[in-house]
Image (cartoon, helix red, strand yellow):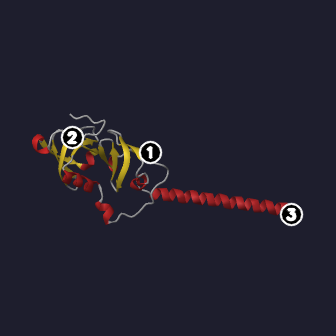
Amino acid sequence: MRWQQLFDDLEGQLAAAEAAELASEVSERTRIEHGRIRLADRVRAGLGTEVVVGCGVDDVRGRLVRVTPDAVVVAEIGGAAVVPLAALAWVSGLDRAASAPREEGPMDRGLGLRMLLRAIARDRSPVRILFRDRSSLAGTIDAVGSDWLDLAVHPLGEPRRAGVSSLRTVRIDAMAVIREGQAPGVSVG
């Protein structure tokens, strides 16, 4: 009888040690998996949800509608905003889920920030660009290069042809938010 209790106690200790080892292994594998998830993958899990994106210049609030390898698009009241991932400081409104990391294929590389900017340029939509230094410009994107764009500067309420005051070549990495037309919280001036 005494030995039975001893054997039961040994079995219990062994089971507890195995459970602890398994928990440790699961925890380590979870940390490794999280370590493989890029910011775009983490944010992509929130597609369709209401988010607030902080980028150090102006918070972007709305529904997350697109995530590319290097930008997010948020539908705000009155328009859309594009935030380059390089300018993104934080996002709230995401749950704990994350999209599985995936290899970028040719399609992913083509669907990046520059493609979004080229689509805006083709559409001739007026934009307000907020820069990381808190300055801003309004106008129409004329051309997009590999790390720059040309902006025909004009007031948002005036057509491009009538109101162009200058042409500015803008470094893409300096941009924090590109807003469609006049979005809430942005004053024209």
State the SS at label 1: loop
Horizontal side of residue 95 vs 5, given as left or right: left
The crowding category of the residue bearing disc 1, from other C-alpha atoms within 10 Å (few below 14, some 14 to 19, many at least 20), is some
Q: Earlier in the sequence, mark 3 or mark 1?
A: 3
Q: Are marks 1 and 2 in contact (CB under 8 Å)?
A: no
Vertical relation: 165 (above or below) 101: above
Give the residue at mark 3. 3
Give the quadrant of residue 93: top left
Give the residue at mark 1. 93
Q: Position of residue 87 (x, y in %)?
A: 33, 46
Task: Give how far apart the Cα atoms at labels 2 and 3 are.
Answer: 83 Å
Q: Nearer the viewer, residue 84 or 158?
A: 158
The amino acid type found where label 3 is placed reads Trp
Mark nearest the camera among 1 and 2 is: 1
From the image, which quarter does the C terminus lie in? top left
Q: Residue furthest right?
A: 1
State the SS at label 2: strand
The amino acid type found where label 1 is placed reads Gly
Disc marking residue 24: none
Q: Residue furthest front?
A: 78
How many numbered discs?
A: 3
State the SS at label 3: helix
- Which residue is found at the position 59% from the left and 60% from the top? 25
Q: Nearer the viewer, residue 103 or 115?
A: 115
Give the residue at mark 2. 137
- Which residue is found at the position 30% from the left and 37% from the top? 184
